[in-house]
Amino acid sequence: MRCLSLALGVSFLIAASSFASTIAIDDLTQGPMSYSATGSGATNGANQSGINTLGGARGSELEHLFDSGMSSVSLSAGGPLTFSGANNFFELGYGYSYTGANGIQISSSLGANLTGTNGIEIDFAPGSSAGIQLFMSSGATGAKESDDNGHGVGLPGGGTSVFIPYSSLSPTFGGGVDLAQVDHILITFQNQGSLTITKIAAIPEPTTMLLPLALFTFATGRRRRAKL
């Protein structure tokens, strides 16, 4: 009877998981795109449309931190996306556009239903360590927002994946994001060295472990809430 109960339980879990599916956010294969930022606090960015992302577009912004050096971003025609420099702060936005002087800002609504998923997974090629934060909002202007500002996740040097569960996000505006109507997704990365991102997806099951952002001494806890 115990064996039968266990078998039924496993069968139930397998059946339940079949109703949930991965939702691709960005496979980072459509370029070319390249730009750089030189000097302390220098920024640059780009927009791409008609690409294979959630919402069909991507906005990005790069900031070079702390010194007179240069940070750069490159996305080849077949991917992946790499950014590098001595001190980098990089943002990828969906439902966002790079505006120049005003940085990356909310520009459109995704209208994505992510209720069948449990969090965002980001895949990397082995590279430098990084601090990562996630901001998600609902409504045309992002009036309902949740984020993990101040307690983001850390990618260890050589790591290849991180999972950010929605349960780790805190409501910051309007009671928090509505997962049945996610209109904007912003992911920020801070690192020293080179980092390559290969895929971003909303997934039903975590496949990686979280590491405290505090492990990475270079992280400054920068937060940029892009909202018009």
Image (cartoon, rainbow, N blue to C red):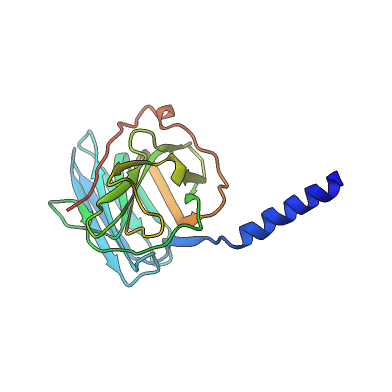
Which image quadrant is residue 185 in?
bottom left
Residue 26 in sight in this render: no
What residue sits 36% from the left and 60% below the top? 181
How many numbered marks have been drawn onto this rendered protein structure?
A: 0
Question: Horizontal placement of 48 versus 214: left or right?
Answer: left
The answer to whether any part of residue 22 appears in the image is yes
Q: Residue furthest left?
A: 101
Image x and y of residue 25, in percent: 42, 60
- Identified at 28% across, 55% down, the residue is 60
Residue 86 in percent (x, y) is at: 31, 37
Q: Nearer the viewer, residue 145 or 211?
A: 145
Image spot of residue 107 (x, y percent): 22, 61
- Would you place residue 4 above or below residue 213 in this image? below
**Residue 62 appears at what percent x and percent y?**
26, 48
Question: Residue at coordinates 50% horizontally, 55% vertically from top-left?
Answer: 117
Farthest right residue? 1
Apparent side of residue 117 relative to residue 101 in the rendered image (left or right): right
Left or right: where does residue 145 sit relative to residue 3?
left
Q: Nearer the viewer, residue 72 or 214?
A: 214
